[in-house]
Image: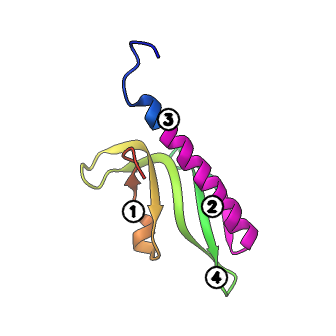
Amino acid sequence: MPDDMETGHSSRGLAAGAVATVTAIASYAALKKGNIQIAFLWYKNVGGCGLNFYRLQADGHRHRFFAIDYHRFKNSHTGEEMNALHYHRGSSVREIKLHRPYEGGW
């Protein structure tokens, strides 16, 4: 390993790879079951993209319950506009609208 490599970079890459693998396996299982839809969307108005997970409702509508996004948003703590990797989760509209920044661990 090179001397100038900062410690922690390889472990973060490994963690990101593990998260991607687990997400892919879980996505496949949900798709196979038939009640989950996944959509990769471009957000032109905020300059980013996201992977959205929807649960199909009994009435045929979709409910977004999780998303991993990268786009511009206003940080609720600092009030500044930022481009950042973040996620959305929750069962209510209020919960799912929150931008939860990725901070190095799931």
**3D distance between C-alphas at marks 2 and 4:** 19 Å
Q: Is residue 27 located in the magenta-colored stretch of the structure?
A: yes
Residue type (three-letter) at the residue carrying disc 4: Gln
**3D distance between C-alphas at marks 1 and 3:** 26 Å
The answer to whether residue 44 shows anywhere in this view is: no
**3D distance between C-alphas at marks 1 and 4:** 22 Å
Check disc 2 and report the residue beneath it: 26
On the image, the x and y values in percent for residue 92 come to 45, 76
Check disc 4 and report the residue beneath it: 57
Q: Say if mark 2 contacts mark 1, CB within 8 Å.
A: no
Check disc 1 and report the residue beneath it: 98
96 lies left or right of 41: left
**3D distance between C-alphas at marks 4 and 3:** 36 Å
Mark 3 crowdedness (10 Å alpha carbons): few <14, some 14-19, many ≥20: few
Please state the extent of the stretch shown in magenta in the rendering.
13-39
Farthest left residue in view: 78
Mark 2 / mark 4, whichever is N-terminal: 2
Q: Residue at x 43, y 53 (%)?
A: 106
Q: Which mark is residue 15?
A: none
Check disc 3 and report the residue beneath it: 13
